[in-house]
Image (tube, rainbow, N blue to C red):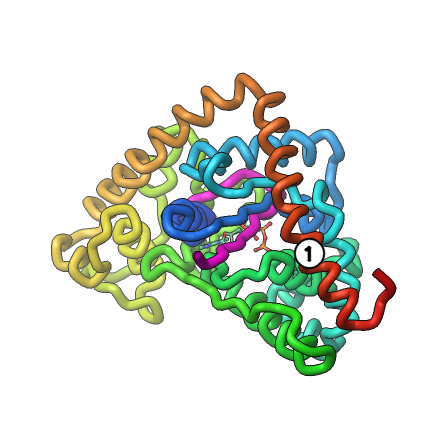
Amino acid sequence: MKRVFSGIQPSGDLHLGNLLGALVNWSKMQEDNDAVYCVVDLHALTLPQEPDVLRKNTVELAQLLIAVGIDPERSTLFVQSQVPQHPQLAWLMECTVSYGELSRMTAFKDKSNRDTTKFVSAGLFTYPALQAADILLYDTDFVPVGDDQRQHVEITRDIAERFNSRYGETFVVPEHVIPEAGARVMDLQKPDRKMSKSEGESPGTVFVLEDPKKIEKKFKRAVTDSESDVRFDIAEKPGVSNLLSILSACTGEAPEDLASNYEQYGPLKTDTAEAVIELLRPIQARFAELQSDPAETQRLLRVGADKAQVVAGEVLARAKRNIGLLA
Ligand code: AQP
């Protein structure tokens, strides 16, 4: 059986990009694989956090993952900071990746340049090393992620190969799994920018727990262009193509085929909003049930962390032994 690993940050409210780009695949892939899924709270610390908000977001994100379909009985679902092997292996990863490689990460360049007056932590620079540790700790074969994470999975592969060639066969070299539709959901107001949860409340971001009326309004106001023909053309028509991609991810039909059903932007916006609202309806209902019992969620996460440590402990011991650290 193949091993699947992926993680998500409790850095804000879950949005449509997270759902279509990553979580739909998380849910599918747990059927035929040994799946390990993680709320990566240590990654959220790369930006300053309110402690109470972080704690609440961590539990609620786990509840949302369960609501989306992650089954904690079948998959291993846990919180990163409850498995100490993650930061331990991260140091070995930091010493295997170069300053130049980390400097080329677009996520770091984007975030550190977004507002030059803001505090830029060293963690924001080195977190791909922690992410490599997250993935490599589980002898992972496949990493289901959105397109924005392609570069981070690549650097994880480079680190694994370098470590293996320096110290002998230690890590499985993983492959990313990126969905055909929904791999890069763009902001509805700025379709040249990916939808992102650290942006906070914004008219361009559709949240998984958002009220259907608000979702309808956001789609109605989505930025398109001054033409009127509906075509799937990401370079020339990013706004319209984003709507077609979202509708495609919800319906399973190819965006090019969907485009031929429309002559105007209005009906495309209405149908996309409706498809999204229907996709979210059962998730919102299940989340409301789970939210009433956070203690049970925390118990499930503890069980998940204990299960994760069995594999993480073995792989960390192998890495320590091979690099020459005392057992
Ligand atoms: N817009 C997106 N379209 C498709 N997939 C996406 N993902 C994120 N945004 C999109 C995928 O969701 C998973 C979790 O990623 P994350 O926790 O990094 O989510 P985020 O929304 O990207 O969070 P932040 O805090 O805003 O982080 P930055 O701005 O650093 O990305 C991943 O598999 C990701 O690919």
Can residue 189 be seen here? The reply is no
As for residue 184 lying within the magenta part, the answer is no
Asked if disc 1 is less than 8 Å from ligand 1, the answer is no
Q: For the magenta stretch, what is the residue range?
A: 1-16
Give the vertical position of 228 relative to 79 (above or below): below
25 horizontally vs 193: left or right:
left
The residue drawn where x is 58% and y is 66% is: 152
**Residue nearest the observer in this picture, 197 or 85:** 85
Q: Position of residue 78 (x, y in %)?
A: 61, 40
Camera-nearest residue between 199 and 131: 131
Q: Which residue ends up furthest to the bottom in the rendered image?
A: 165
Q: Position of residue 265 (x, y in %)?
A: 22, 51
Q: Going 44% across and 49% down the picture, which residue do you hit? A: 26
Q: Quadrant of the C terminus?
A: bottom right
In the image, residue 72 sits, relative to residue 111, either above or below, namely above
Residue at 41%, 28% (x, y): give it: 284
Q: Quadrant of residue 217?
A: top left
Residue at image x 48%, y 35%?
73
* Front-most of residues 276 and 224: 276
Q: Which residue is mark 1?
A: 314
Q: List x then y, in percent, for residue 120.
A: 77, 58
Does the magenta-highlighted stretch encompass residue 3? yes
Q: Residues within 10 Å of mark 1 (few under 14, many from 20)?
A: some
Compare residues 263 and 111 and report the one nearer the observer.
111
Q: Dot 1: what SS?
A: helix
Q: Is residue 43 above or below residue 125?
A: above
Query: Given the current orientation, which residue lies at the most extreme top position?
Result: 292
